[in-house]
Image (cartoon, helix red, strand yellow):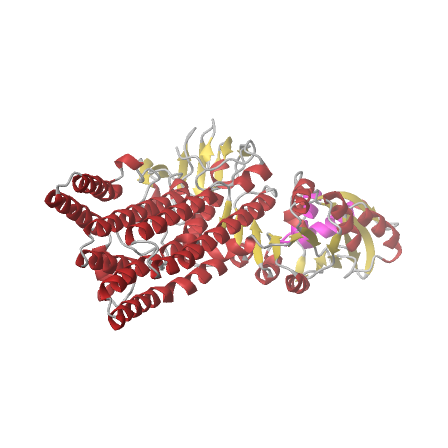
Amino acid sequence: MSDDCCACEATGAPGPDEDAESRPVWWRDPALLPSVVAGVFLLAGYGAQWAGLEVASWVLLGIALLVGASTFVPGALRRLAKRRLGIGLLMTIAAVGAVALGHVGEAATLAFLFSLAEALEDRAMDRAKEGLRALLSLLPDTVRVLRGSGEVALPASEVQVGDLLIVGAGDRVATDGVVTEGRSGLDTSAVTGESIPVEVGPGDAVAAGSVNGAGTLLIAATAQGSDNSLTQIVALVEQAHARKGERARLADRIARPLVPLVLIAAALVALYGVLVGDPGTWIERALVVLVAASPCALAIAVPVTVISAIGAASKFGVVIKSGQAFEELGTIGTVALDKTGTLTRNEPSVVDVVPRDGVRREDVLGWAAAVEATSSHPLAAALTAAAPGTRPAAGVVEDAGRGISGSVAGAAIRVGSVRWVDPGALRGSADAMAAQGMTVVVVEADGVVAGLIGVRDELRSEAAETVRLLHAQGIDTVMLTGDHDATARALAAQAGIDDVRAEQLPADKAAVIRELVARRPTAMVGDGINDAPALASATVGVAMGLTGSAAAIESADVAFTGRDLRLLPGALAHARRGRRIMTANVGLALAVIIGLFPLALFGVLGLASVVLIHEVAEIAIILNGVRAARPVGLRSEVGAAELQPARAS
């Protein structure tokens, strides 16, 4: 067993080959066996000493010492050979010194308690990482693939883009793909945290790890079996363990130099004993100081909490990319929400058309659909759906954030917002449509306004509840949108948001975020490519959903695999609780060092007492850190009935 954690090194996440069942029950855990054996011999040795059997006592205590020390002395020596100092070295010196002074019992007690604390620490870290192992276990071992020669069975990791997967009833989807045949309901709770089955059919995207319902699906793979959305989630969380936040860096800044400082302090204490003519007493105190000032508890205070909390969040569809992002998530005082696709369903539809006198309604829709036919703008789908079968326009030019133009049957058509195309005589109608929460699209033909199209994207059903939950936590909310001010305010009023920043281009959104960050920590929540600058400018950027753009997800610090907005207040509450646990752990670790040092220096406590107090404190810190694995905030905000953790089959 190494002392890496106690030497302030980052603890890595489990590899893909580790499964969720790798941690046995404690009484069958071989890692605990040396500590158990050492403990048995230690008790037997003290029993023999009490009975007056001195030789037997020395032998039994010596065995306890050797067994306990075998768990950390070899690692300490290997690290020393590489010129790296660790807590194991402090404990080794203390044990050797105690034996040299004739205190074999105290040396054995030190070895037993330290080996036990290390074993429990490793076990706690393994438990903290089990969320990732559970995610990986969602992928099937084998998959049925339709090839030219018929159906073949392949390892899931060998699936290639373009392969046709046969997914039967109850089977798990091995990788991301698109349904080409069949209809069924998919249980995506393990991936997105949303328990309501999703109905899918031809053309619908499906995510790796989803469980198929009663029907059989033929799915065209859009990602490799070894590199899909689920494995990427695990990779992101693994990377998160290595990227440290403020509290982790603080603990490291204190713990790293503390080991050599403790060695120097102990040497000075021993030297003082030589100078005053009482080397025996002060050398013994120097050994006690080595243990008392050991920063092992400080080194583990933050990592066990971060790994526990990030692993728990990943099971509920919240992927936190770094320890720094997790800590900053717990400081958020303002949340800025993009309107389209975040607060709204991102399913806009045409709800009203106002043509100019002498222009047919069908012509207004047809012209708009023609120039929008090849556009990727969210409103384009609504406009083309309102005039199916329309042929695309020629010479299409898109002006990002404003509108689009092109040629239809020789006529120059411009389609865009009221900021780009003045509605002229239809200004009153445009204002009335905006007041009803519609996005107003102005259609111009040969320089003359032809009509207005009102498009509305309804609020998500949980949007108002999400805003209420954020306000209940004392968090301010801001809506950011490129839409018309009146439209934005109508939707914001329904959601319960008072601060509205409308008619914002991507650069404007980023500027607003920088302004908000200057006042207090701010999270930006978005899902589109136009949100990427704002996400990167925020204290914490949050990308919504598997359907979010790659640019948005790349720019974000936190990604939600699901689409339920109530993940947001749940994640914030979870991070705040984790931050409180980290603060308490660091405080307790420092208090133990500060409190024990003078007691050890002046001989108030002996070696065995200091070791006991130190290791009990470390165990308390570990147990407290593991509490962060309980996603209390996520459960309470979204509800256990609606947001379920991943379940391995």
| Residue at 49% over, 33% down | 187
User: Residue 179: where, in percent of width, then height?
Assistant: 49, 38
The image quadrant of residue 120 is top left
User: Residue 361: where, in percent of width, then height?
Assistant: 80, 45
Magenta-drawn stretch contains 377: yes
In this view, the residue farthest toward the left is 55
In this view, the residue farthest toward the bottom is 275
User: Residue 634: where, in percent of width, then height?
Assistant: 55, 41
Residue 574 as seen in the image, left or right of residue 17? right
- The boundaries of the magenta stretch are 362-386
Which residue is at the front of the view, 80 or 176?
80
In this view, the residue farthest toward the top is 214
Which residue is at the front of the view, 641 or 429?
641
User: Residue 415: where, in percent of width, then height?
Assistant: 74, 56
Magenta-drawn stretch contains 66: no
Which residue is at the front of the view, 71 or 429?
71
Residue 537 as seen in the image, left or right of residue 593? right
Residue 285 as seen in the image, left or right of residue 582? left
Q: Is residue 430 at least partly visible in the picture? A: yes
Magenta stretch: dominant secondary structure = helix
Q: Is residue 389 at least partly visible in the picture? A: no
The image quadrant of residue 639 is top right
Which residue is at the front of the view, 90 or 622?
90
The image quadrant of residue 10 is bottom left
Residue 15 as seen in the image, left or right of residue 45? right
